[in-house]
Image (cartoon, grey):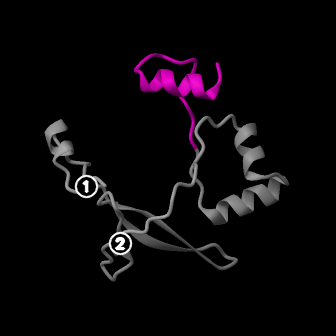
Amino acid sequence: MDSRERTFLALDFQEPDRVPIDVWMSSGFERKITAALGTTRQQLLDELDVDLRYIEGPRYIGPPLRDFGDGVDEDIWGVRRQRVEVDTGRGVETYHEVALSPLAEAPGVEQIIAHDHWP
């Protein structure tokens, strides 16, 4: 079974041969692991049999998004992300992680449909 079949079966609530795998890495960790293994990102994901791949979409060009001034900003979906700095011993790496997911507490479909941040 290939990644596409596996993923679509899982999304259709059918049982694939195994759970589809995804990998999220900070850019600093990705640089470190690919350098240590002497490989590329693509080769690493292939070697680990990762099913899901990120595809860069179009850049946002709409009105300014909310910036709370404390390292937290909000995307077009209403998801707030916190800027995180990590001292790696070889410098500071910066990335963003979810600080508030607006639908995390939605009790039902009605609240999801009523969410005011659908683009």
Work out which quarter of the rendered image holds the C terminus and state it: bottom left
Q: Element at badge 2?
A: strand
**In the visual, does 107 lie left or right of 39?**
left
Residue on which the image places disc 1:
102
| Residue placed furthest toward the bottom | 69
Question: Answer yes or no: do the residues labelled 1 and 2 have beta carbons within 8 Å?
Answer: no
Q: Is residue 88 above or below residue 10?
A: below
Please provide percent x and percent y for residue 85. 51, 75
Specify the segment rendered in magenta.
1-22
Please provide percent x and percent y for residue 25. 60, 55
**Residue 35 sits in which quadrant?**
bottom right
Please provide percent x and percent y for residue 21. 57, 35
**In the visual, does 49 lie left or right of 52?**
right
- What residue appears at the point 73 percent right and 62 percent down from the top-left corner? 32
- Marks 1 and 2 sit apart, C-alpha to C-alpha, by 13 Å
Is residue 74 in sight in this rendering?
Answer: yes
Residue on which the image places disc 2:
73
**Residue 52 sits in which quadrant?**
top right
Residue type at mark 1: give it.
Pro
Work out which quarter of the rendered image holds the N terminus and state it: top right
